[in-house]
Amino acid sequence: MTARPEFYRFHNGEKAPLQFSEAEYAARVAGLRKIMADAGVSAAVLTSMHNVSYYSGFTYCSFGRPYALVVTETECVTISAGIDAGQPWRRCYGDNITYTDWQRDNYWRAIASVAGENAWVGLESDHLTMLQQSKLVAFLKPAATVDLYDATMRQRMHKSAAEIEMIRAGAAVADVGGYAIRDAIKEGVREIDVAMAGRDAMELEIAKRFPDAEYRDTWVWFQSGINTDGAHNPVTARKLQRGDILSLNTFPMISGYYTALERTLFVGEVDDASLKIWEANVGAHELGISLLQPGASCAEVTEQINAFFAERDLLQYRTFGYGHSFGVLSHYYGREAGLELREDIDTVLEPGMVISMEPMLTIADGQAGAGGYREHDILVINEDGNENITGYPYGPEFNIVG
């Protein structure tokens, strides 16, 4: 009987074009190796979807199976499950090892074949579970472990020129979805029908702009009436009614890169109380955009928008922070938590960062102006200030529709 391997290399077919150049990925891995050297780490075992995608170009689908990227001074190897066959190798920068599932923990045996034993090992504490960390210790027997999650996050926060072009394209795709949604809004139409119109338009636009990409996970959250009270509320079959407040949210996903467009709209007409709150939120949005300058801290920007709302007795209706970073992130995997517009984040904005401005106010059902109001633009921080790469208009002049 032929012995079954614990892991093997299944380099099936030819390498597919990656979303970025070999030089782009080489520069990212070089940045990681500098982080490792500064921390005394000889092997980094990265397990999160966002870091595996950022450094290798391979965006995995876990489905209950663990994945990794192992980087040493000389090697850069993705570790993938047999169910994916040769796709991870075709879609990654560097080498790939496939682990088999006939014996438990072949995943860790594959990792150990690259990382070795008794090394100083870097890991991601914000992703590695207690169970998997215990297995890391058992199989790698590290001399020491070093947490790399913060340092890698800070590397991802500073975008390359190629990343900014990708994000710019994503913002344009989000606009396409926004216009398709606007065209689909009519009294009596269901939320799900409007959402599908926006998603389909974005999928087609992504395929046109990126013919060599993988296509997955682009989505729309389109809410109406009371369903607008939360920023992440799912789509329903509720039918739109005249006077409804609406929340348009388009989210293209391109090779692990997320972008977004979010807008407040009304069906047919808007009452005076709602218009007053909407215009105040637009004012906060415009103020916030003006504050996103190099040298400003996230906390300082937040406090100034807080003061704007407090002067209008609206601050109590704010539901979350005013913006966040963009790049390799998604609704089901990581984000760059060190670049969020909140009171407890003191990160200073620098050229090459990309951040949203997205104030939201939620007025409870039964009160005048009830509903959730949110505007969202994407800003690239540059030497002179910022560049707004969102094109779809905000405010009442364009967004009372149907």
Image: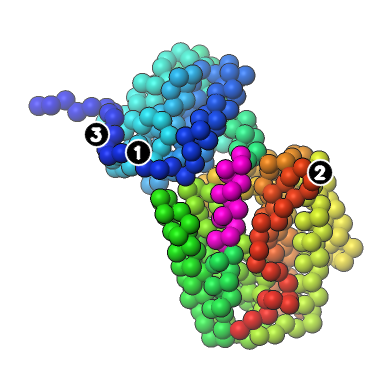
Q: Which amino acid does the dot numbered 2 rest on?
A: Ala
Q: From the viewer's perspective, is residue 112 above or below residue 225?
A: above
Which amino acid, by three-letter code, is at mark 3?
Trp
**Is residue 269 positioned above or below 97 on the image?**
below
Looking at the image, is mark 3 or mark 2 earlier in the sequence?
A: 3
Span highlighted in magenta in the image:
160-174
Residue that sits furthest to the left in the current view:
1
Q: Residues within 10 Å of mark 1 (few under 14, many from 20)?
A: some
Q: Is residue 320 visible?
A: no
* The C terminus, quarter of image: bottom right
Q: In the rendered image, which residue does mark 1 sit on?
A: 15
What residue did someone put label 2 on?
A: 296
> Label 1 is placed on what type of residue?
Lys
- The reply to whether the magenta stretch includes residue 67 is no
Q: Locate residue 233: give its quadrant.
A: bottom right
Query: Do residues under tags 3 and 2 come within 8 Å of each other at their CB atoms?
Result: no
For numbered disc 3, what is the local secondary structure? loop
Residue designated by label 3: 102
| Quadrant of the rendering where the N terminus is positioned | top left
